[in-house]
Image: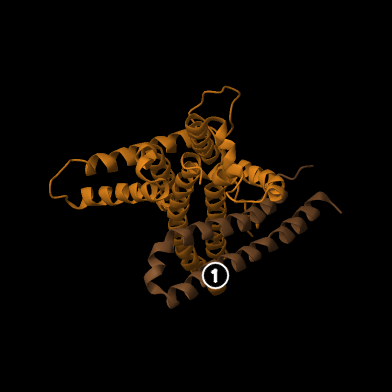
Chain colours: A brown, B orange
């Protein structure tokens, strides 16, 4: 298999990890909303933690995207 | 038929103004440096316009006070009373990342010049994170001396668990500067790759012509607007998370839990 074909396939497979990020981020916001609708008074104080959780989940998913980009454009030959 | 390849990487190229390749000399005025200067000018102009010390603040001053009060809140809630000492750095990091992210998302390209997102390179955000981490280490060792290492042993763990938990905590501590710097970089990088890809879709749709071409171009353009709005949101969130996490790490160093 030529390198360029392997690159494209590898990038495609690595990008599946971004779907996992979508699940993770949705989980963070969904859990927050569930708790907030039960206890709206306590929701305001936790919005900071919400954004930290979102950023952490997003970071790991975007690392999968970064691996896809590295494979596609700067593969360790 | 137009070339079908999309190259989203070209927008991240750092080059001296007026040329395409980096020369060997270490001192060159690059597009990254130019946009860092533009970020500086925007920040200074914004802050200068809002620190006129009017007794009854006008809109500009109210906006600046809202921003500084927001970051002051972050340091005060994370670090406590002594958090004021660290406010200059936390605010600097926050407003630099915020302005750099937002300036990169301005759709100036319609008029000609393409904005360059300074924070879309790991060198920039990595350096900000290194400075944060050096402050954490410096404050930790200056205040507590070698007792700083008690940070890795949570209170009340049984002795046997301590041997397992301490190395894990240590490694997780070492990963902090890396993840702190990687987060805003990767968010901006991915966001701008996405913007570039959708922009290419618009151009290719319009150049293909015909009903299908214009339809796809229009659809891609609508998506482009939404993705740009998302970029603005993500840029603001990343700046906030960087500032908040810096404050939390400094809190770990100052008040060893």
Q: In the picture shown, does residue B37 fall above or below B197?
A: above
Q: Please report the residue visible at 72 percent of the width from the left and 60 percent of the height from the top.
A: A12
Q: Which residue is mark 1?
A: B216
Q: In the picture shown, does residue A15 fall above or below B89?
A: below
Chain at tag 1: B
Q: Position of residue A4 (x, y in %)?
A: 78, 51
Direction left: furthest residue: B55
Relative depth, front residue between A34 and B213: A34
Q: Mark 1: which secondary structure?
A: helix
Q: Position of residue A27 (x, y in %)?
A: 57, 69
Q: Please report the residue visible at 56 percent of the width from the left and 23 percent of the height from the top.
A: B26
Q: Position of residue A49 (x, y in %)?
A: 47, 59
Direction right: furthest residue: A1
Total count of labels:
1
Q: Please report the residue visible at 69 percent of the width from the left and 54 percent of the height from the top.
A: A68
Q: Please state, as top left, top right, bottom left or bottom right, where the N terminus of chain B lies in the image.
A: bottom right
Callout 1 environment at 10 Å: few (<14), some (14 to 19), or many (20+)? Answer: some
Q: In the picture shown, does residue A57 fall above or below B144?
A: below
Query: Does residue B78 appear to the left or right of B63 in the view shown?
Result: right
Residue B114 in view in this figure: no
């Amino acid at each position: 298999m030529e390198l360029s074909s392997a690159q494209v396939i590898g990038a495609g497979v690595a990008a599946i990890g971004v779907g996992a990020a979508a699940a993770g981020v949705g989980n963070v916001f969904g859990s927050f909303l569930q708790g907030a609708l039960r206890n709206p008074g306590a929701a305001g104080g936790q919005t900071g933690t919400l954004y930290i959780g979102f950023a952490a989940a997003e970071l790991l998913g975007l690392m999968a995207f970064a691996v896809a980009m590295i494979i596609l454009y700067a593969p360790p030959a | 038929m137009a070339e079908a390849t999309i190259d989203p990487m070209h927008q991240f190229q750092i080059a001296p103004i007026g040329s395409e390749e980096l020369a060997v000399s270490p001192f060159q005025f690059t597009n990254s440096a130019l946009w860092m200067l533009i970020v500086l000018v925007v920040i200074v102009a914004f802050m200068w316009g809002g620190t006129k010390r009017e007794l009854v603040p006008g809109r500009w001053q109210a906006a600046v006070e809202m921003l500084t009060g927001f970051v002051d809140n972050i340091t005060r809630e994370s670090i406590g009373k002594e958090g004021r000492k660290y406010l200059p750095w936390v605010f600097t990091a926050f407003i630099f990342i915020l302005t750099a992210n937002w300036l990169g998302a301005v759709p100036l390209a319609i008029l000609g010049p393409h904005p360059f997102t300074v924070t879309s390179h790991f060198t920039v955000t990595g350096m900000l994170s290194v400075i944060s981490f050096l402050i954490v280490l410096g404050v930790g060792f200056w205040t507590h001396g070698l007792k700083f290492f008690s940070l890795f042993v949570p209170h009340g763990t049984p002795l046997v668990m301590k041997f397992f938990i301490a190395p894990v905590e240590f490694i997780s501590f070492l990963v902090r500067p890396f993840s702190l710097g990687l987060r805003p970089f990767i968010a901006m990088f991915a966001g701008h790759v996405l913007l570039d890809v959708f922009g290419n879709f618009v151009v290719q749709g319009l150049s293909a012509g015909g009903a299908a071409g214009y339809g796809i171009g229009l659809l891609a353009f609508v998506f482009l607007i939404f993705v740009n709005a998302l970029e603005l949101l993500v840029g603001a969130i990343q700046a906030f998370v960087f500032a908040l996490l810096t404050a939390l790490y400094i809190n770990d160093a100052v008040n060893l839990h």
